[in-house]
Image: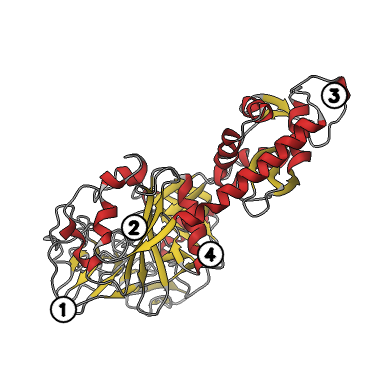
């Protein structure tokens, strides 16, 4: 069916520059399911250098006759971006306060601030751009000027984590669409693969049918509650023991571990994705909570294949549910709303039956349990009977280091939150430069009172504004920081 014709050599359509041809996982999955010589030829082109103008091809699940792509010129711009991006991962400090005492560092960094405005305390999921860096001559610490979308500040380099968003940007920014037939014709032509029009027509029809079948995967989603939850958690009911699903710490435990789920069917369900080959097995699962305010929240998603995480998110959107923004075991309240926007719900709380349970699971987000109040939350209160559900042996856990409060006394300042100012030794005053501390200066008629200090010989210390104190950098003046053992 595949033939080489010189008729197509001149059809340049969308391709002119030589680049490495890249496909998305979904695009490769569709090609692998199509039994047609053109599908094999397309797969053979990947990772080869050809004169393509459009690259990073992807499936459009909403329109089976369209392909997604990004102009290769734009892709190269993204990949060639030399800017450095970071997350702030500090909790109880890690930034310089906007005070005159830090002006020397600020000047080196080119950082300015408004009086009365504190440095931005960026959440750990927000990405900022590094503007400049410098090393303190006194402490040896590296300080970094970072601009975040919602604010800026100067941060300790040890509290920053470099983020590489280039790959993500390739698949999300500047994307365009092209009809399947046109895009595939241009791709094959650029690779020197020639074919008949009827071959391409057959391929396009098979492509559309395959995408439609992928869309029907929603039929494999089911929500279960009560006693069934324990059944679907066990690895014997997985299609494969692979991926985050297969490695889950709760995949081989007794059913009584899930008592807190099973006993609260009004607020806790398990969303499962059944295997297309065997509906007695699953390929993914995620807890679905009904929050105190009535919202539905899909917790961390566990799957055999990473690509199915997005399918769960699409299913959540279809049902008007919120879903965890970063698929991890963090207690963050940041979610993807049903409209696709990223929002921060802050404190997320579920009301459950009060009292103790038979045993306890490891919880990813709503890990703070108060049996007396009958709540699960993503935020620790530090009050009363509060436990952290992060034990894999079914036990309750209360941190012995902080007593469950989540905070420890700062070891740097002993809990005071401050030190004596090293410029005035805590006195709040410094020797007057004008009179060298004598309170007298030479005048026209002999010694006279120093006008700079009023004859006292001292001036208010400008570094601590006369307070005699400097805030502790490690805890930002709080006197405590997040517990190193349980936070």
First in sequence: mark 3 or mark 1? 3
| Residue that numbered label 1 is attached to | 372
Picture coordinates of residue 149 (x, y %)? 55, 62
Distance from the alpha carbon under mark 2 to that under mark 4: 25 Å
Do the residues under discs 4 and 3 have CB atoms within 8 angstroms?
no
Which circle, 2 or 4, is nearer the viewer? Answer: 4
Q: Quadrant of the C terminus?
A: bottom left
First in sequence: mark 4 or mark 1? 4
* Mark 2 residue element: loop
| 49 up-or-down from 157: above or below | above
Which residue: 60% across, 40% down?
27
| Residue that numbered label 2 is attached to | 330
Do the residues under discs 3 and 1 have CB atoms within 8 angstroms?
no
Distance from the alpha carbon under mark 2 to that under mark 1: 24 Å
* Mark 4 residue element: helix
Based on the displayed image, in which of its 4 quarters is residue 457 positioned? bottom left
Which circle, 3 or 1, is nearer the viewer? Answer: 3
Which residue: 45% across, 51% down?
309
Picture coordinates of residue 305 (x, y %)? 43, 43
Distance from the alpha carbon under mark 3 to that under mark 1: 75 Å
First in sequence: mark 2 or mark 4? 4
Q: Residues within 10 Å of mark 3 (few under 14, many from 20)?
A: some
Q: Residues within 10 Å of mark 4 (few under 14, many from 20)?
A: few
| Residue that numbered label 4 is attached to | 318
Picture coordinates of residue 406 (x, y %)? 22, 65
Q: Residues within 10 Å of mark 2 (few under 14, many from 20)?
A: some
- Is 188 placed left or right of 168 in the picture? right
First in sequence: mark 2 or mark 1? 2
Q: Quadrant of the N terminus?
A: top right
Q: Which mark is residue 9?
A: 3
Residue 272 appears in the figure: yes
């Amino acid at each position: 069916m595949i033939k080489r014709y010189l008729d197509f050599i001149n059809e340049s359509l969308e391709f002119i520059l030589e680049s490495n041809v890249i496909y998305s996982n979904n695009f490769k999955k569709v090609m692998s399911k199509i039994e047609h010589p053109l599908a094999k030829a397309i797969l053979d082109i990947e990772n080869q250098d050809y004169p393509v103008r459009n690259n990073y091809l992807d499936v459009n699940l909403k329109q089976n006759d369209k392909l997604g792509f990004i102009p290769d010129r734009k892709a190269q711009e993204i990949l060639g971006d030399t800017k450095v991006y970071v997350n702030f991962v500090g909790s109880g400090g890690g930034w310089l306060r906007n005070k005159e005492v830090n002006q020397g560092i600020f000047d080196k960094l080119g950082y300015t601030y408004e009086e009365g405005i504190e440095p931005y305390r960026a959440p750990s999921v927000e990405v900022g751009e590094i503007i400049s860096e410098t090393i303190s001559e006194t402490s040896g610490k590296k300080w970094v000027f970072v601009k975040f979308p919602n604010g800026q500040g100067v941060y300790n380099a040890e509290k920053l984590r470099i983020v590489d968003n280039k790959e993500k940007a390739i698949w999300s920014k500047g994307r365009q669409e092209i009809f399947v037939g046109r895009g595939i014709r241009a791709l094959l032509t650029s690779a020197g693969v020639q074919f008949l029009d009827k071959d391409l027509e057959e391929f396009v029809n098979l492509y559309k049918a395959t995408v439609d079948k992928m869309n029907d995967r929603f039929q494999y989603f089911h929500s279960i509650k009560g006693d069934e939850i324990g059944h679907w958690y066990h690895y014997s009911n997985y299609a494969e023991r692979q991926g985050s699903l297969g490695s889950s710490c709760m995949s081989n435990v007794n059913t009584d571990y899930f008592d807190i789920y099973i006993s609260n069917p009004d607020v806790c369900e398990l969303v499962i994705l059944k295997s297309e080959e065997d509906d007695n097995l699953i390929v993914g699962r995620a807890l679905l909570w009904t929050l105190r305010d009535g919202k539905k929240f899909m917790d961390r998603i566990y799957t055999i294949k990473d690509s199915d995480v997005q399918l769960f998110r699409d299913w959540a959107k279809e049902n008007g549910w919120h879903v965890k923004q970063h698929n991890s075991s963090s207690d963050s309240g940041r979610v993807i709303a049903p409209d696709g926007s990223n929002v921060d719900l802050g404190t997320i709380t579920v009301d459950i039956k009060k009292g103790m349970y038979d045993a306890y699971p490891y919880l990813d987000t709503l890990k703070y349990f108060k049996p007396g109040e009958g709540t699960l939350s993503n935020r620790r209160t530090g009050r009363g009977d509060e436990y952290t559900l992060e034990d894999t042996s079914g036990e309750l856990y209360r941190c012995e280091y902080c007593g469950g409060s989540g905070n420890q006394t700062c070891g740097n300042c002993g809990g005071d939150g401050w030190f004596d100012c090293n410029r005035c030794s805590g006195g709040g005053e410094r020797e007057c430069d004008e009179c060298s501390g004598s309170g007298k200066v030479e005048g026209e008629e002999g010694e006279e009172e120093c006008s700079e200090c009023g004859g006292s010989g001292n001036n208010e210390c400008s570094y601590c504004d006369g307070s005699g104190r400097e805030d502790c950098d490690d805890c930002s003046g709080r006197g405590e920081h997040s517990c190193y053992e349980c936070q």
